[in-house]
Image: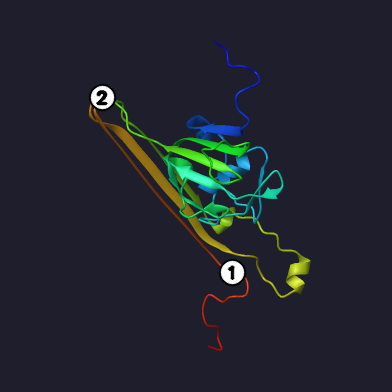
Amino acid sequence: GAAPVVDLTSTTTSVNLTRDTLETIPAGRGYQHLFAMTPGITTGGAPDVGDSSLASRNPIQSYGVAATAKMDVEGMNISVGESSGVYFQTYSFEEIQIKTSGNDAEVSTPGISMVSVLKSGSNQFHGSYVFAFQRPQFESSNMNDFLRSQGLSETSPLRYYYEVAGDLGGRIIRDKLWFFVSTAKQQRVSGLLGFASGPGADG
């Protein structure tokens, strides 16, 4: 039968992010950045474009209140305060559910609950890959006269950024034994204002 328009048995406010959603929405693949896709949750800190901030973890708020998130991956709690103690990319996940309020007794702490299910093998072989690359030529500049008057010649200069990832799953023995492997590598090299890349002419 059709699902009811109003759920009278649960008080939990949640959103389910399926594999199709994760692959379709143009967003960074950082695990914690999924909070930005959830109604009622806001993230602070500097904006992350295409997950180029690597493993940075921005503070989160649930309906305007600083929240302690409980993050589970296949039943294992990886939470540390408001963020995760380990860094995942959404590339490895099949489905993710984020609960923002009204949690039941399964959630031992107040605040946000994130439950994640990893991809797995099947009788059919399947895989995917992704590659991203950026050079300074593709980066705009916000230099203006005011910044130049402060003695700056450039803002945080990007040298290069790249990300490569892939996964493969399938069967070893049909209906009995499957496999799934996934790997990813990401690197970003950029300068920091106020620091020199090497000794100047005066040593």
Residue nearest the viewer, comparing 149 with 119: 119
Instruction: Identify residue type, mark 1.
Output: Leu
Decide: few, some or many residues near mark 1? Use Cα within 10 Å; few <14, some 14-19, many ≥20. few
Quarter occupied by the N terminus: top right
**Residue drawn at point x = 58 percent, y = 16 percent:** 3
Relative horizontal placement of residue 80, taking residue 178 as reference (left or right)? right
Q: Which mark is residue 68?
A: none
Q: Pick whichever, 179 or 130, lies toward us.
A: 179
**Residue 30 seen by the camera:** no
Residue at image point 35% right, 34% down: 120
**Identity of the residue furthest to the top in this view:** 1
Foreground residue among 145 and 53? 53
For numbered disc 2, what is the local secondary structure?
A: loop
Viewer-side label of 1, 2: 2
Q: Quadrant of residue 100?
A: top right
In the image: residue 47, left or right of residue 76: right
| Residue found at x 53% / y 75% | 197
Instruction: Reply above or below: 26 against 45.
Output: above
- Badge 2 local density, few (<14 within 10 Å), some, or many (20+)? few
x, y percent for residue 36 = 62, 43
Q: Position of residue 18 (x, y in %)?
A: 50, 31
- Can the viewer see residue 116 in this picture? yes
Query: What residue sits right under mark 2 in the picture?
Result: 175
Whichever of labels 1 and 2 marks the residue nearer the N terminus, that label is 2
Q: Is residue 130 left or right of residue 197?
A: left
| Residue 155 to residue 199: above or below | above
- Picture colour scheme: rainbow
Most distant residue in the left direction: 173
C-alpha span from label 1 to label 2: 53 Å
Residue at mark 1: 192
* Amino acid residing under circle 2: Asp
